[in-house]
Image (cartoon, helix red, strand yellow):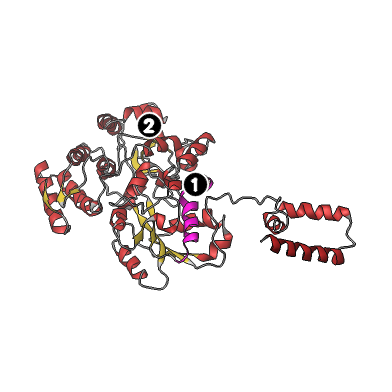
Amino acid sequence: MNNYRRVISLILIVCMCFGLSACGKKQEENQTTEQQATPQDATSESLFDESVVVTPNPLPMELPTLGGEKIYVYSYDSVFGNRMDSEFRSRYPEFSDLVEYRDLNYQVTDPAYMDALKEATEGREKPSVFIVPDNQVKRFLEWEYAAPIADCGLDTTLYTKEAYPYTVDFGTDADGNLKALTWQATPGVMFYNTKIAEEVLGVSDASSVQAMVSDFDGFMEVAAKMKEAGYYMTSSPEDLMQPWLDMKQTPWVVDGTLTVDTVVTDYLEGAKEIYANNYSMNQARGTAKWSNNMSNGKVFCFFGSSVWLSKNSVFVPKEQKYRVCAGPFVYHLGGAYIFIGKDCPNNELLALLLYTMTCDEDAMYDLCETDDDFPNNQAAVSRLIADGVTMGDVYLNGQAPLETFDVIAKQLDRSNATEYDTEIEEYFLAVSHTYNTGNKSTLEDAIESLRKRVEEGVDEVSGYE
Protein backbone atom coordinates (compact mmCIF):
# COMPACT_ATOMS: atom_id res chain seq x y z
CA MET A 1 0.00 0.00 0.00
CA ASN A 2 2.88 2.39 0.84
CA ASN A 3 4.53 1.63 -2.55
CA TYR A 4 1.20 2.37 -4.22
CA ARG A 5 0.98 5.71 -2.49
CA ARG A 6 4.57 6.55 -3.51
CA VAL A 7 3.76 5.81 -7.16
CA ILE A 8 0.64 7.99 -7.01
CA SER A 9 2.64 10.73 -5.33
CA LEU A 10 5.33 10.68 -8.04
CA ILE A 11 2.74 10.83 -10.80
CA LEU A 12 1.03 13.78 -9.16
CA ILE A 13 4.35 15.58 -8.66
CA VAL A 14 5.27 15.17 -12.33
CA CYS A 15 1.87 16.50 -13.37
CA MET A 16 2.23 19.46 -11.06
CA CYS A 17 5.71 20.29 -12.40
CA PHE A 18 4.66 20.34 -16.07
CA GLY A 19 1.05 21.49 -15.78
CA LEU A 20 1.13 23.85 -12.84
CA SER A 21 4.58 25.45 -13.04
CA ALA A 22 3.02 28.88 -13.49
CA CYS A 23 1.15 28.73 -10.18
CA GLY A 24 2.64 30.79 -7.41
CA LYS A 25 3.14 29.90 -3.84
CA LYS A 26 -0.02 31.76 -2.78
CA GLN A 27 -2.19 29.72 -5.14
CA GLU A 28 -0.68 26.49 -3.83
CA GLU A 29 -1.49 27.54 -0.27
CA ASN A 30 -5.09 28.37 -1.24
CA GLN A 31 -5.41 25.07 -3.03
CA THR A 32 -4.17 23.18 0.01
CA THR A 33 -6.66 25.03 2.23
CA GLU A 34 -9.54 24.15 -0.09
CA GLN A 35 -8.45 20.51 -0.18
CA GLN A 36 -8.56 20.29 3.59
CA ALA A 37 -11.98 21.97 3.76
CA THR A 38 -14.05 19.02 2.51
CA PRO A 39 -14.02 15.39 3.68
CA GLN A 40 -14.01 14.10 0.09
CA ASP A 41 -10.86 16.08 -0.85
CA ALA A 42 -9.24 15.09 2.43
CA THR A 43 -9.78 11.45 1.53
CA SER A 44 -7.95 11.92 -1.76
CA GLU A 45 -5.17 13.84 -0.04
CA SER A 46 -4.72 11.05 2.47
CA LEU A 47 -3.38 8.81 -0.31
CA PHE A 48 -0.06 10.58 -0.03
CA ASP A 49 -0.34 12.52 3.25
CA GLU A 50 -1.25 10.36 6.21
CA SER A 51 -1.34 13.41 8.53
CA VAL A 52 -4.66 14.57 7.03
CA VAL A 53 -7.59 13.75 9.35
CA VAL A 54 -10.79 12.55 7.66
CA THR A 55 -14.03 13.85 9.26
CA PRO A 56 -15.73 10.83 10.86
CA ASN A 57 -19.25 9.75 9.97
CA PRO A 58 -21.47 11.06 12.83
CA LEU A 59 -23.89 8.12 12.46
CA PRO A 60 -23.42 4.91 14.48
CA MET A 61 -23.34 2.95 11.20
CA GLU A 62 -21.88 3.07 7.72
CA LEU A 63 -23.97 4.86 5.12
CA PRO A 64 -25.47 2.56 2.49
CA THR A 65 -23.91 2.23 -0.93
CA LEU A 66 -25.41 4.49 -3.55
CA GLY A 67 -27.15 2.58 -6.30
CA GLY A 68 -28.06 -0.39 -4.11
CA GLU A 69 -31.26 -2.42 -4.26
CA LYS A 70 -34.60 -0.67 -3.75
CA ILE A 71 -36.68 -1.49 -0.66
CA TYR A 72 -40.46 -1.28 -0.35
CA VAL A 73 -42.42 0.08 2.61
CA TYR A 74 -46.04 -1.10 2.89
CA SER A 75 -48.68 0.46 5.09
CA TYR A 76 -52.42 0.57 5.64
CA ASP A 77 -52.46 4.40 5.37
CA SER A 78 -50.30 7.39 4.41
CA VAL A 79 -49.12 8.53 7.85
CA PHE A 80 -45.73 6.84 8.00
CA GLY A 81 -45.05 7.86 4.41
CA ASN A 82 -45.59 11.48 5.37
CA ARG A 83 -43.24 11.09 8.34
CA MET A 84 -40.63 9.54 6.04
CA ASP A 85 -40.91 12.57 3.78
CA SER A 86 -40.32 15.02 6.60
CA GLU A 87 -37.56 13.13 8.42
CA PHE A 88 -35.85 10.53 6.20
CA ARG A 89 -36.08 11.85 2.65
CA SER A 90 -35.18 15.38 3.73
CA ARG A 91 -32.04 14.12 5.47
CA TYR A 92 -30.95 11.60 2.86
CA PRO A 93 -32.25 12.74 -0.54
CA GLU A 94 -29.59 10.63 -2.25
CA PHE A 95 -31.38 7.49 -1.01
CA SER A 96 -34.94 8.70 -1.53
CA ASP A 97 -35.49 6.90 -4.83
CA LEU A 98 -34.40 3.63 -3.24
CA VAL A 99 -37.26 3.64 -0.74
CA GLU A 100 -40.73 3.25 -2.27
CA TYR A 101 -43.86 3.70 -0.17
CA ARG A 102 -47.02 1.68 -0.82
CA ASP A 103 -50.25 2.85 0.83
CA LEU A 104 -52.69 -0.07 0.66
CA ASN A 105 -55.52 2.03 2.15
CA TYR A 106 -57.10 -0.21 4.80
CA GLN A 107 -58.91 0.63 8.01
CA VAL A 108 -56.94 -0.08 11.18
CA THR A 109 -59.36 -2.83 12.22
CA ASP A 110 -59.52 -4.58 8.83
CA PRO A 111 -57.96 -8.08 9.00
CA ALA A 112 -57.74 -8.06 5.19
CA TYR A 113 -54.62 -5.91 5.53
CA MET A 114 -52.64 -8.94 6.66
CA ASP A 115 -53.94 -10.91 3.68
CA ALA A 116 -52.79 -8.12 1.36
CA LEU A 117 -49.33 -8.17 2.92
CA LYS A 118 -49.12 -11.93 2.57
CA GLU A 119 -49.97 -11.58 -1.09
CA ALA A 120 -47.24 -8.94 -1.49
CA THR A 121 -44.64 -11.33 -0.07
CA GLU A 122 -45.29 -13.61 -3.04
CA GLY A 123 -44.45 -10.94 -5.60
CA ARG A 124 -41.21 -9.35 -6.78
CA GLU A 125 -41.63 -6.15 -4.79
CA LYS A 126 -41.71 -7.71 -1.35
CA PRO A 127 -42.25 -5.59 1.75
CA SER A 128 -38.94 -4.93 3.49
CA VAL A 129 -40.88 -2.74 5.91
CA PHE A 130 -44.56 -2.93 6.84
CA ILE A 131 -46.50 -0.70 9.20
CA VAL A 132 -48.96 -2.34 11.57
CA PRO A 133 -51.67 -0.59 13.61
CA ASP A 134 -51.36 -0.93 17.36
CA ASN A 135 -54.38 -3.21 17.66
CA GLN A 136 -52.86 -5.84 15.32
CA VAL A 137 -49.25 -5.86 16.55
CA LYS A 138 -49.55 -8.98 18.71
CA ARG A 139 -50.85 -10.99 15.78
CA PHE A 140 -48.06 -9.82 13.46
CA LEU A 141 -45.35 -10.62 16.02
CA GLU A 142 -45.99 -14.30 15.39
CA TRP A 143 -46.09 -14.06 11.59
CA GLU A 144 -43.23 -16.08 10.12
CA TYR A 145 -42.42 -13.36 7.56
CA ALA A 146 -41.71 -10.80 10.30
CA ALA A 147 -37.99 -10.80 11.09
CA PRO A 148 -36.22 -9.67 14.27
CA ILE A 149 -35.07 -6.07 13.94
CA ALA A 150 -31.49 -7.12 14.66
CA ASP A 151 -31.44 -9.13 11.41
CA CYS A 152 -30.98 -5.95 9.36
CA GLY A 153 -27.84 -5.04 11.29
CA LEU A 154 -29.30 -2.23 13.40
CA ASP A 155 -27.95 -2.14 16.95
CA THR A 156 -31.27 -2.37 18.78
CA THR A 157 -29.85 -0.77 21.93
CA LEU A 158 -29.88 2.49 19.98
CA TYR A 159 -33.67 2.17 20.14
CA THR A 160 -34.25 0.50 23.50
CA LYS A 161 -32.10 2.88 25.54
CA GLU A 162 -34.37 5.87 24.81
CA ALA A 163 -37.73 4.37 23.78
CA TYR A 164 -40.46 4.31 26.40
CA PRO A 165 -40.27 0.83 27.98
CA TYR A 166 -43.87 -0.11 27.21
CA THR A 167 -43.23 0.24 23.47
CA VAL A 168 -40.21 -2.06 23.68
CA ASP A 169 -42.11 -4.73 25.60
CA PHE A 170 -45.10 -4.48 23.29
CA GLY A 171 -42.92 -4.94 20.20
CA THR A 172 -41.14 -8.04 21.55
CA ASP A 173 -42.30 -11.54 20.66
CA ALA A 174 -42.74 -14.54 22.96
CA ASP A 175 -39.13 -15.64 22.35
CA GLY A 176 -37.71 -12.29 23.41
CA ASN A 177 -37.00 -10.98 19.90
CA LEU A 178 -37.60 -7.27 19.30
CA LYS A 179 -39.66 -7.30 16.11
CA ALA A 180 -41.50 -3.97 16.11
CA LEU A 181 -40.40 -0.37 16.61
CA THR A 182 -42.44 2.81 16.77
CA TRP A 183 -41.62 6.44 16.16
CA GLN A 184 -44.32 7.71 18.52
CA ALA A 185 -45.58 7.03 22.01
CA THR A 186 -49.32 7.44 22.49
CA PRO A 187 -50.14 8.19 26.14
CA GLY A 188 -53.82 8.73 26.82
CA VAL A 189 -55.20 11.90 28.40
CA MET A 190 -58.49 13.62 29.15
CA PHE A 191 -59.24 16.54 26.82
CA TYR A 192 -61.52 19.06 28.55
CA ASN A 193 -63.28 22.21 27.37
CA THR A 194 -61.67 25.18 29.15
CA LYS A 195 -64.67 27.48 28.80
CA ILE A 196 -66.99 24.93 30.40
CA ALA A 197 -64.42 24.22 33.12
CA GLU A 198 -64.17 27.89 34.02
CA GLU A 199 -67.95 28.34 34.05
CA VAL A 200 -68.86 25.23 36.05
CA LEU A 201 -65.78 24.48 38.13
CA GLY A 202 -64.37 27.97 38.49
CA VAL A 203 -60.96 26.87 37.21
CA SER A 204 -59.52 25.81 33.87
CA ASP A 205 -55.83 25.11 34.53
CA ALA A 206 -54.79 21.48 34.13
CA SER A 207 -53.53 20.88 37.68
CA SER A 208 -56.77 22.11 39.27
CA VAL A 209 -58.99 20.10 36.92
CA GLN A 210 -56.83 17.00 37.40
CA ALA A 211 -57.25 17.24 41.17
CA MET A 212 -61.01 16.99 40.65
CA VAL A 213 -60.98 14.00 38.26
CA SER A 214 -58.00 12.00 39.52
CA ASP A 215 -60.23 8.98 40.25
CA PHE A 216 -63.61 7.76 39.05
CA ASP A 217 -65.48 9.01 42.12
CA GLY A 218 -64.16 12.51 41.52
CA PHE A 219 -64.96 12.19 37.84
CA MET A 220 -68.58 11.37 38.65
CA GLU A 221 -68.85 14.28 41.08
CA VAL A 222 -67.78 16.62 38.29
CA ALA A 223 -70.24 14.87 35.95
CA ALA A 224 -73.09 15.70 38.34
CA LYS A 225 -72.04 19.37 38.34
CA MET A 226 -71.92 19.40 34.55
CA LYS A 227 -75.44 18.00 34.32
CA GLU A 228 -76.74 20.56 36.79
CA ALA A 229 -75.20 23.35 34.69
CA GLY A 230 -76.79 22.02 31.48
CA TYR A 231 -73.75 20.22 30.02
CA TYR A 232 -72.81 16.60 29.36
CA MET A 233 -69.70 15.07 30.89
CA THR A 234 -68.92 12.87 27.88
CA SER A 235 -70.18 12.31 24.38
CA SER A 236 -70.55 8.58 25.03
CA PRO A 237 -70.01 6.09 27.87
CA GLU A 238 -67.80 4.31 25.34
CA ASP A 239 -65.24 7.07 25.74
CA LEU A 240 -64.16 5.44 28.99
CA MET A 241 -63.87 1.88 27.70
CA GLN A 242 -60.33 1.91 26.30
CA PRO A 243 -58.91 3.89 29.25
CA TRP A 244 -60.55 1.54 31.72
CA LEU A 245 -59.63 -1.70 29.96
CA ASP A 246 -56.00 -0.63 29.64
CA MET A 247 -55.79 -0.96 33.41
CA LYS A 248 -56.65 -4.69 33.44
CA GLN A 249 -54.37 -6.80 35.63
CA THR A 250 -54.91 -9.98 33.62
CA PRO A 251 -55.13 -10.60 29.84
CA TRP A 252 -58.44 -11.27 28.14
CA VAL A 253 -57.18 -14.74 27.24
CA VAL A 254 -55.01 -17.04 29.37
CA ASP A 255 -54.16 -20.49 27.95
CA GLY A 256 -57.07 -20.30 25.51
CA THR A 257 -59.59 -19.39 28.20
CA LEU A 258 -61.53 -16.12 28.44
CA THR A 259 -60.63 -14.26 31.62
CA VAL A 260 -62.79 -11.45 32.99
CA ASP A 261 -60.77 -9.06 35.14
CA THR A 262 -62.49 -7.01 37.86
CA VAL A 263 -61.68 -3.93 35.76
CA VAL A 264 -64.07 -5.30 33.12
CA THR A 265 -66.98 -5.45 35.54
CA ASP A 266 -66.00 -2.06 36.99
CA TYR A 267 -66.33 -0.55 33.52
CA LEU A 268 -69.73 -2.14 32.93
CA GLU A 269 -71.04 -0.67 36.17
CA GLY A 270 -69.40 2.73 35.59
CA ALA A 271 -70.64 3.06 32.02
CA LYS A 272 -74.17 2.12 33.10
CA GLU A 273 -74.09 4.77 35.82
CA ILE A 274 -73.07 7.42 33.28
CA TYR A 275 -75.83 6.25 30.93
CA ALA A 276 -78.54 6.06 33.62
CA ASN A 277 -77.77 9.53 35.00
CA ASN A 278 -77.75 11.16 31.54
CA TYR A 279 -74.19 12.35 32.05
CA SER A 280 -73.52 11.44 28.41
CA MET A 281 -75.14 12.19 25.07
CA ASN A 282 -74.96 8.41 24.42
CA GLN A 283 -73.62 8.75 20.90
CA ALA A 284 -71.43 6.00 19.48
CA ARG A 285 -67.73 6.80 19.57
CA GLY A 286 -66.27 7.64 16.18
CA THR A 287 -69.55 8.70 14.55
CA ALA A 288 -70.15 12.12 13.02
CA LYS A 289 -72.45 13.13 15.90
CA TRP A 290 -69.80 12.12 18.41
CA SER A 291 -67.17 14.18 16.58
CA ASN A 292 -69.47 17.19 16.29
CA ASN A 293 -69.68 17.33 20.06
CA MET A 294 -66.05 18.39 20.12
CA SER A 295 -67.01 21.73 18.63
CA ASN A 296 -70.62 22.42 19.69
CA GLY A 297 -69.77 23.40 23.27
CA LYS A 298 -72.14 20.89 24.90
CA VAL A 299 -69.69 18.22 26.13
CA PHE A 300 -67.06 18.77 28.80
CA CYS A 301 -64.47 16.09 28.06
CA PHE A 302 -63.17 13.42 25.70
CA PHE A 303 -60.64 10.66 26.22
CA GLY A 304 -57.97 10.68 23.53
CA SER A 305 -54.20 10.56 23.29
CA SER A 306 -51.19 12.45 22.02
CA VAL A 307 -52.13 11.18 18.53
CA TRP A 308 -55.10 13.56 18.59
CA LEU A 309 -52.72 16.50 18.33
CA SER A 310 -50.85 15.19 15.29
CA LYS A 311 -51.70 16.14 11.74
CA ASN A 312 -54.90 14.71 10.26
CA SER A 313 -56.22 13.44 13.60
CA VAL A 314 -59.85 12.85 14.60
CA PHE A 315 -59.72 15.75 17.06
CA VAL A 316 -61.31 18.77 15.35
CA PRO A 317 -62.68 21.12 18.02
CA LYS A 318 -62.92 24.17 15.73
CA GLU A 319 -63.98 27.20 17.82
CA GLN A 320 -63.69 25.45 21.19
CA LYS A 321 -60.50 25.52 23.26
CA TYR A 322 -59.28 22.51 25.16
CA ARG A 323 -56.52 21.52 27.55
CA VAL A 324 -55.39 18.09 28.70
CA CYS A 325 -54.83 16.39 32.02
CA ALA A 326 -54.18 12.77 32.96
CA GLY A 327 -57.73 12.12 34.16
CA PRO A 328 -58.69 9.08 36.26
CA PHE A 329 -56.88 6.47 34.13
CA VAL A 330 -53.38 5.53 32.99
CA TYR A 331 -53.78 4.30 29.42
CA HIS A 332 -52.66 4.49 25.81
CA LEU A 333 -54.69 5.01 22.66
CA GLY A 334 -53.76 4.40 19.04
CA GLY A 335 -50.34 4.22 17.45
CA ALA A 336 -48.56 2.10 14.86
CA TYR A 337 -45.44 -0.06 14.73
CA ILE A 338 -42.72 -0.74 12.17
CA PHE A 339 -41.94 -4.35 11.22
CA ILE A 340 -39.33 -5.66 8.82
CA GLY A 341 -39.57 -8.59 6.43
CA LYS A 342 -37.07 -11.39 6.11
CA ASP A 343 -34.54 -11.47 3.28
CA CYS A 344 -34.36 -7.71 2.73
CA PRO A 345 -32.24 -6.96 -0.38
CA ASN A 346 -30.61 -3.85 1.16
CA ASN A 347 -30.09 -4.21 4.89
CA GLU A 348 -27.78 -1.19 5.14
CA LEU A 349 -30.47 1.09 3.75
CA LEU A 350 -33.12 -0.57 5.91
CA ALA A 351 -31.02 -0.02 9.04
CA LEU A 352 -30.53 3.65 8.16
CA LEU A 353 -34.27 4.11 7.64
CA LEU A 354 -35.11 2.47 10.98
CA TYR A 355 -32.41 4.41 12.80
CA THR A 356 -33.61 7.74 11.40
CA MET A 357 -37.28 7.12 12.09
CA THR A 358 -36.98 5.62 15.59
CA CYS A 359 -33.52 6.27 17.10
CA ASP A 360 -32.05 9.52 15.78
CA GLU A 361 -32.59 12.03 18.58
CA ASP A 362 -32.56 15.03 16.24
CA ALA A 363 -35.06 13.42 13.89
CA MET A 364 -37.30 12.55 16.84
CA TYR A 365 -37.10 16.15 18.04
CA ASP A 366 -38.02 17.43 14.58
CA LEU A 367 -40.89 14.93 14.37
CA CYS A 368 -42.61 16.78 17.18
CA GLU A 369 -41.94 20.22 15.74
CA THR A 370 -42.89 19.27 12.19
CA ASP A 371 -45.76 16.81 12.59
CA ASP A 372 -46.91 17.24 16.21
CA ASP A 373 -46.15 13.59 17.00
CA PHE A 374 -45.10 12.75 20.54
CA PRO A 375 -41.74 11.05 19.84
CA ASN A 376 -40.85 7.67 21.29
CA ASN A 377 -37.46 8.95 22.42
CA GLN A 378 -37.03 10.14 25.98
CA ALA A 379 -33.87 12.14 25.28
CA ALA A 380 -35.65 14.06 22.51
CA VAL A 381 -38.66 14.64 24.76
CA SER A 382 -36.45 16.01 27.53
CA ARG A 383 -34.94 18.49 25.07
CA LEU A 384 -38.35 19.46 23.75
CA ILE A 385 -39.63 20.14 27.27
CA ALA A 386 -36.51 22.12 28.18
CA ASP A 387 -36.85 24.18 24.99
CA GLY A 388 -40.52 24.92 25.66
CA VAL A 389 -41.73 23.23 22.48
CA THR A 390 -45.48 22.64 22.43
CA MET A 391 -47.92 20.46 20.51
CA GLY A 392 -51.37 21.27 19.21
CA ASP A 393 -51.16 25.01 19.93
CA VAL A 394 -54.27 25.65 17.86
CA TYR A 395 -56.29 23.29 20.07
CA LEU A 396 -54.80 23.54 23.55
CA ASN A 397 -55.13 27.23 24.27
CA GLY A 398 -51.39 27.70 24.87
CA GLN A 399 -50.88 24.66 27.11
CA ALA A 400 -47.62 22.72 26.73
CA PRO A 401 -48.66 19.05 27.14
CA LEU A 402 -45.32 17.27 26.63
CA GLU A 403 -44.52 16.91 30.31
CA THR A 404 -47.93 15.37 30.97
CA PHE A 405 -47.45 12.94 28.07
CA ASP A 406 -43.97 12.04 29.31
CA VAL A 407 -45.15 11.25 32.86
CA ILE A 408 -47.98 9.02 31.59
CA ALA A 409 -45.86 7.25 28.95
CA LYS A 410 -43.37 6.19 31.61
CA GLN A 411 -46.17 4.49 33.57
CA LEU A 412 -47.74 2.56 30.70
CA ASP A 413 -47.79 -1.23 30.76
CA ARG A 414 -49.04 -3.27 27.80
CA SER A 415 -47.96 -6.65 29.16
CA ASN A 416 -51.56 -7.91 29.30
CA ALA A 417 -52.30 -7.29 25.62
CA THR A 418 -53.20 -10.29 23.45
CA GLU A 419 -53.83 -10.85 19.77
CA TYR A 420 -57.53 -11.37 20.52
CA ASP A 421 -58.19 -8.03 22.18
CA THR A 422 -59.78 -6.23 19.23
CA GLU A 423 -62.30 -8.98 18.52
CA ILE A 424 -63.20 -9.51 22.17
CA GLU A 425 -63.60 -5.80 22.83
CA GLU A 426 -65.97 -5.44 19.87
CA TYR A 427 -68.19 -8.07 21.51
CA PHE A 428 -67.71 -6.44 24.88
CA LEU A 429 -68.84 -3.06 23.54
CA ALA A 430 -72.06 -4.64 22.25
CA VAL A 431 -72.63 -6.29 25.62
CA SER A 432 -72.08 -2.98 27.39
CA HIS A 433 -74.76 -1.36 25.20
CA THR A 434 -77.29 -4.02 26.11
CA TYR A 435 -76.40 -3.74 29.79
CA ASN A 436 -76.75 0.06 29.74
CA THR A 437 -80.20 -0.08 28.19
CA GLY A 438 -81.47 -2.81 30.52
CA ASN A 439 -81.68 -5.60 27.93
CA LYS A 440 -79.31 -7.52 30.19
CA SER A 441 -80.68 -6.94 33.66
CA THR A 442 -77.79 -8.19 35.76
CA LEU A 443 -74.02 -8.05 35.61
CA GLU A 444 -73.90 -11.84 35.53
CA ASP A 445 -76.18 -11.89 32.48
CA ALA A 446 -73.90 -9.41 30.72
CA ILE A 447 -70.77 -11.48 31.40
CA GLU A 448 -72.50 -14.67 30.26
CA SER A 449 -73.51 -12.93 27.04
CA LEU A 450 -69.89 -11.90 26.47
CA ARG A 451 -68.67 -15.45 27.08
CA LYS A 452 -71.10 -16.89 24.51
CA ARG A 453 -70.22 -14.26 21.89
CA VAL A 454 -66.49 -14.90 22.31
CA GLU A 455 -66.85 -18.68 22.18
CA GLU A 456 -68.86 -18.43 18.97
CA GLY A 457 -66.75 -15.72 17.34
CA VAL A 458 -63.14 -16.45 18.33
CA ASP A 459 -62.06 -19.95 17.36
CA GLU A 460 -58.97 -20.06 19.55
CA VAL A 461 -60.83 -19.12 22.77
CA SER A 462 -63.17 -21.29 24.78
CA GLY A 463 -64.36 -21.58 28.34
CA TYR A 464 -64.56 -18.89 30.95
CA GLU A 465 -62.68 -18.21 34.13
Residue 59 is left or right of residue 254, and the answer is: right
Q: Earlier in the sequence, mark 1 or mark 2?
A: 2
Residue 258 is left or right of residue 242, and the answer is: left
Tell me which amino acid carries mark 1.
Answer: Met
Q: Quadrant of residue 43?
A: bottom right
Q: Is residue 356 magenta?
A: yes
Q: 41 or 229, which lies in front? A: 41
Q: 454 or 195, which lies in front? A: 454
Q: 259 or 129, which lies in front? A: 129
Q: Secondary structure at mark 1?
A: helix
Q: Quadrant of residue 148?
A: bottom left
Q: Is residue 293 visible?
A: no
**In x, y percent, where is residue 181?**
40, 51
How far apart marks 1 and 2 lie (CA) works out to 34 Å
Marking on residue 364 = 1
Marking on residue 349 = none
Q: Is residue 122 above or below residue 29?
A: below
**In x, y percent, where is residue 99?**
49, 63
Q: Is residue 231 above or below residue 358?
A: above
**Residue at mark 2:** 197
